[in-house]
């Protein structure tokens, strides 16, 4: 019968008992093949020391797993603030509360975005397309929507990426071997995000008001990203009409971007950035 060694400082509270632990008595073909564990009386309680050790191990494993899960959740939460790529840092202050509405179209579109956020929190998957006049607040609303999702307490990751800024960083990495912003970096990062905003689609080609077509490089990057996001939600902002987008990009790419869409269109809202210009 196996006895576990007990430190002398603890022995005054512990005595051995004649009973053995059923759980740690191994019997095969009617014969014991492992010495049974003798129980102990510890502080007046009859216990199996091996069971106590195993229970302690399970508690430690559970605590370690919980700590690791919390680490992963915090890492996802920080993705939005640490890894988003912005063209204008003033958008960092964008919230739903400070998107001020002055006209019916703005009020309606803000309400649509708020309703979309509720649907996304409930697990629905669709793409939110914000299209229309520059300066109407499309990027503001997209960033604010992701902020709302990120702060919801859900175990998710959110990412806001200005497409033009991303393309410049990737091109810079071609000659800058110290840069982490490679094509593979962005494709992997944006593929993994649960909620992604592609900000200002079309501006990366310099094609606003022109007939330019997106380069093979741009299309390859965007196609790689959208291919992996068919079961995830993507928010898209653009100043361009659907006609222009279909002319600039491969139809398969636009079809992926517009998969299961909810449109938020600005036709009448003026450029908010021009409000304070006195001439």
Image (cartoon, helix red, strand yellow):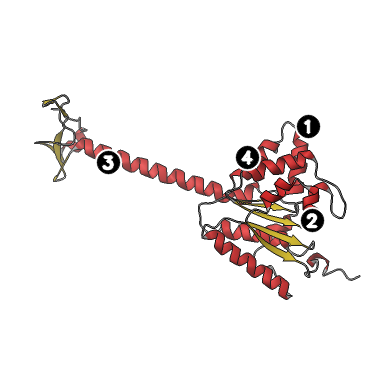
Q: Give how far apart the Cα atoms at labels 4 and 1 are.
A: 21 Å
Residue for badge 2: 243
Please say if 259 is above or below 272: above
User: Of label 2 and label 1, which has the lower sequence position?
Assistant: 1
Residues at circles 3 and 4 in contact by the CB criterion of under 8 Å: no
Q: Residue at x 55, y 48 (%)?
A: 76
Please name the residue that numbered disc 1 is placed on: 175
User: Which quadrant of the figure contains the C terminus?
Assistant: bottom right
Instruction: Left or right? Give the position of 77 relative to 134.
Output: left
- In this view, which residue lies farthest toward the right? 279
Q: Residue under circle 4?
A: 188
Seen at 83% across and 46% down, the residue is 213
Mark 4 → mark 2, Cα distance in angstroms: 30 Å
Q: Is residue 97 visible?
A: no
Categorize mark 3 by other alpha carbons within 10 Å: few (<14), some (14-19), many (20+): few
Tell me the quadrant of the picture where the N terminus can be found: top left
Is residue 36 among the parts visible in the rendering?
A: yes
In the depicted structure, whether residue 99 falls above or below residue 246? below
Label 2 – label 1 distance at C-alpha: 35 Å
């Amino acid at each position: 019968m196996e006895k576990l060694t007990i430190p002398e400082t603890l022995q005054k509270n512990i005595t051995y008992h004649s009973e053995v632990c059923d759980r740690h008595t191994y019997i095969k073909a009617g014969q014991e093949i492992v010495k049974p564990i003798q129980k102990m009386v510890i502080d007046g309680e009859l216990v199996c020391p091996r069971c106590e050790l195993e229970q302690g191990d399970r508690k430690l494993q559970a605590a370690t797993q919980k700590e690791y899960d919390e680490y992963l959740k915090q890492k996802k939460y920080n993705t939005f603030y640490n890894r988003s790529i912005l063209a204008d840092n003033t958008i960092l202050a964008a919230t739903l509360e400070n998107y001020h509405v002055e006209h019916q179209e703005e009020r309606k579109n803000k309400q649509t975005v708020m309703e979309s956020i509720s649907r996304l929190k409930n697990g629905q998957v669709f793409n939110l397309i914000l299209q229309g006049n520059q300066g109407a607040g499309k990027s503001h609303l997209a960033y604010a929507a992701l902020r709302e999702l990120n702060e919801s307490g859900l175990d998710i990751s959110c990412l806001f990426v200005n497409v033009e800024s991303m393309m410049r960083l990737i091109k810079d990495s071609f000659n800058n071997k110290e840069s982490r912003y490679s094509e593979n970096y962005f494709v992997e990062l944006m593929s993994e995000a649960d909620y992604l905003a592609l900000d200002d689609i079309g501006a990366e080609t310099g094609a606003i008001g022109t007939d330019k077509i997106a380069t093979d490089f741009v299309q390859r990057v965007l196609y790689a990203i959208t291919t992996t996001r068919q079961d995830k939600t993507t928010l898209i902002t653009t100043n361009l009409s659907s006609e222009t987008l279909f002319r600039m990009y491969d139809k398969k790419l636009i079809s992926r971007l517009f998969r299961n869409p909810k449109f938020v269109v600005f036709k009448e809202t003026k450029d908010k950035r021009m409000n304070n210009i006195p001439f």
